[in-house]
Amino acid sequence: MSLLANETIDILRFVVALPFFAYASYSDFKERLISTNVWFYLGFFAIAFDIIQFPDWLSIIALVPSIIIYYEWFFEWDHKWVSYVFYGFAAALFLYSLTFAEAVVPLIVMFVMMLFIRALHSAKVLRGRADVRALMSVALLQPLYPSFYHFPLFVPEYVDIVQITFPFVLLVLLYSAITAAFYLFFLLFRNLARKDTGFPEMFIGYRIPIDEVDKQHVWLMERVVDGEHVLYVHPKAHEKEDLEKLKKIGRERVWVQPKIPFIIYITAGLVLAYLIGNFI
C-alpha cells in the first residue's frame, strides 16, 4: 500500500518536475546546452515517487530495469561490455517481471516506453540526447495517468486501459507536437499581419533585418549560390560570406527560421498533459 495518497504523489510529481523542465528549457534556449545533471537528479525524485506509490518488492524488482536503462546512458564506459552487462541484467529482470506481470503492469509498460524512446533516438526521429532524456524522465516519473484535485480536466472513460495502451509519456509527446504545430500557425498569422508572404517560408520562418541575423538564435534560410538567390526550407549554419552576398543583391530583410529547442515544446506538452489530460 502506498505511503501517500496517489493524488498527493501526483501533485508532488508535477510540482517537482516543472522547475527542472523550466530550467532545461531556459538553459537550452539561452545557452544551447542542458546540463545532464538536470535529468540525473530529476531521476532520483522520479524513482522516489515510484517507490512510494509502489512500495512492494515485486514492484521494486519490476522498476529496476527502467532505472538501469535510464541511468546507464549517463556514463561513458571505457569498455562496451560494461553497457552490455547492464542491459543484460535489465533484460533478465524484465523477463522475470513478466512472470508476475499482472501485479506490475504499469512498470512493465514503463520499461517498454524507455526502450521505445531510445529507439526513436536511434532512428533519429528524436535527435537531441537532452530531449530523449527528458521524455525518459517523464516515463520514469509518471507510470500512470495523474489525478489530483480537479486535474486533469479530461480523463478517459476507460482510463485503466488507456494509460497502458497510450502511456502518459506518449500523451506528453502528443501535446509537444500539437504545441509545435500551433507555433507554425502563429508564424503564419504573424507574417500575414506584417505582409511578409511566401510559400512555404511564411509557415516556418519570418523576416528580420539582415544585420540582426547574427544577433539572434536563428537559421538563415536564404543564400546566394552560383549567382542565384536560393531559399532553404531546412537551413544549416551560415557563414559571414553568405550575408555579404545577400547584401550585394540588395537583400535588406531576410527569411530566418527560429532555433527553438524541442525541450520547450516538451515542457509545454508536460504542463498540458497534467492539466488538460487525454481528450481523445
Image (cartoon, rainbow, N blue to C red):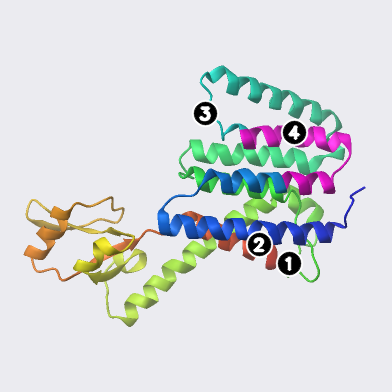
Using the image, determine if residue 103 lies above or below residue 169. above
Q: Which residue carries the number 2 mark?
A: 273
**Residue hosting label 1:** 152
Name the element at disc 2: helix
Range covered by the magenta-colored residues = 46-71
- Residue 236, image x and y in percent? 28, 50
Q: Which residue lies furthest to the right in this view?
A: 1
The crowd level at tag 2 (other Cα within 10 Å; few <14, some 14-19, many 20+) is many
Amino acid on which disc 3 is placed: Glu
SS assignment for the magenta stretch, majority: helix
Q: What residue is drawn where x is 83% and y is 38%?
A: 59
Q: Nearer the viewer, residue 9 or 145?
A: 9
Q: In this view, does 241 lie to the left or right of 7?
A: left
Taking the image as shown, residue 196 lies to the left or right of residue 1, namely: left
Structural crowding at the residue carrying mark 3, measured as other residues with C-alpha within 10 Å and reported as few (<14), some (14–19) or many (≥20) = few
Residue 76's tag is 3
Q: Nearer the viewer, residue 255 or 41?
A: 41
Residue 86 in view, yes or no: yes
Q: Earlier in the sequence, mark 2 or mark 4?
A: 4
Identity of the residue drawn at 70% across and 49% down? 141
Q: Which mark is residue 64?
A: 4
Element type where label 4 sits in the image? helix
Q: Gap in Å between the C-alphas at discs 2 and 3?
A: 33 Å
Q: Which of marks 4 and 1 is nearer the N terminus?
A: 4
Please tell me whether mark 3 sits on a helix, a strand or a loop. Answer: loop
Q: How far apart are the two marked residues, 2 and 4, measured between alpha carbons?
A: 26 Å
| Residue 187: image location, x then y, percent | 38, 71
- Indicate which label's residue lies in the foreground, 4 or 1: 4
- Looking at numbered disc 4 in the image, what kind of residue is underneath it? Val
